[in-house]
Amino acid sequence: MKRSVLQQSVKVALGQAALPVGSLTFNRDGARESSTFAYHETWLTSANRFEISPDLRLVEGHQFRKPSSRDDSIFHFAFADTEPDGWGCRVIARDHARRRKSAQEKGEEVPRAGLTEMDYLLGVDDMSRIGALRLINEAGNYLRTIEDGGRGTPPLLELAHLIGATRAVEMNKETEADLRYLRGRGTSLGGMRPKCTVLDDDGHLAIGKFPSIKDDRSVTRGEVLALHLAAEAGITVAESRIVMSEEVPVALVRRFDRVAHGGRIPYLSAGSMLQASRQDEHAYTQIADCIIARCVDPKRDLEELWRRLVFNLLITNVDDHVQNHGFLHVEHGQWRLAPAFDVNPFPDKDPELKLWLNEDYGPVDSIEAAVNEAGYFKLAADEARRVLGEVYNAVRNWKRVARSASVGMTDADLDAFEPAFENGQMEAVATLL
């Protein structure tokens, strides 16, 4: 049997101005997939050049990427950050299967059966792709764009339509029209939960996160509550609010990698900055090392990272993995910690974070251990005490914020989330202070 060989290349550009950066090539030989990237000569000689990914040195020639495990991306880390999440992959795969079936019924040319990792990468809408990297095909089209030239990113007025289409996908009852509507729109980042890229009332790009049919509590209100509490605790956060659509609470989270008039800011996840394998465990102290090495204001970002560590423990945000921390590019290869996002209280989980404290201690599960490690984050004892007090005072007022108009929790919601905020770690902080 003849082995299947496939090669596909796209141009890589940066930002709204689409500055030429290089070319990305996907290779498949049988079951083996890999990729290569080469910088464009104009990028290598530009005064504003920087490594777009920590594993892509500023040198001429093709740089090969083969993943270290089956769980890791075949693309260099910066490109892997822009791949669709679990929900996005689900939408892309369903849409592809529906297109194949439709083509067979109409006697048209049928798309190939299996989707490659390149297909998923190129299935993300160009307007909503995270960060500033953009992919362009030989015809000069940004990947991906809406085929019929229609509007790719819907306004808030279409939330009800979006919710209906995503619920149909969740229940395995989606129609061709549902998938056509979600195509590109439903492929933004953020895990397995249903979501869609939308435009806020002022035209700013945002992510609309919808309740799941499997939810037993108001997860969308919980996320907005956590983000608002984080802001009160002195943490820089993505702006968010609850928007109602036909009595359905949607968490609207504004994108922090966009500026006025469509400008785009380069972004790297903490996992990419660490060049981390998805199979390994990772620690807050490792992210701290990246801040010291790469950030324009390490003192500020180290305090902020420790503040987030403490906050996550006190609200039982146990989904604090390295993809849920990130960095924004400032200039000349220097970065800053991106605003906090995907912060969720888990009232049904034990207070043990996904990220380790350091490589010896293991997962963060004790406020005392976090305080003992504050020196690694360049915090003196009195500074750590001040930060801890600010976070504690914000979290203990969670019910007031939960009842605010921007969150809108009911008494039943308060009962459901109470274990996440009123716990042994909060009691331990009260004793320490």
Image (cartoon, rainbow, N blue to C red):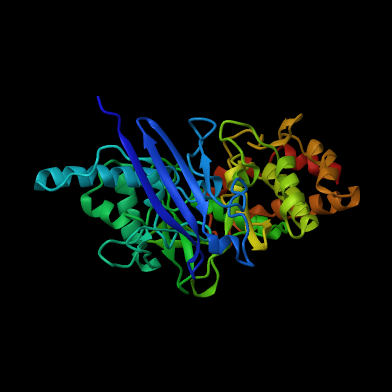
Q: Position of residue 383 (x, y in %)?
A: 86, 53
Q: Where 287 sits versus 278, above or below?
A: below
Residue at 40% of width from left, 40% of height from top? 27
Give 190 or 266, whichever is nearer the viewer: 266
Give 14 or 383, whichever is nearer the viewer: 14
Q: Position of residue 212 (x, y in %)?
A: 41, 45
Q: Where 327 sits versus 370, above or below?
A: below
Give 72 or 231, whichever is nearer the viewer: 72
**123 left or right of 53 in image:** left
Q: Is residue 257 visible?
A: no
Residue at 61% of width from left, 38% of height from top? 276
Q: Is residue 85 visible?
A: yes
**301 left or right of 110 in image:** right
Instruction: Pick the quarter of the image with the N terminus.
Output: top left
| Count of marks placed on residues | 0
**25 left or right of 257 in image:** left
Residue at 25% of width from left, 47% of height from top? 174
Q: Position of residue 199 (x, y in %)?
A: 43, 67
Residue at 61% of width from left, 31% of height from top? 280
Q: Position of residue 327 (x, y in %)?
A: 63, 54
**129 left or right of 2 in image:** right
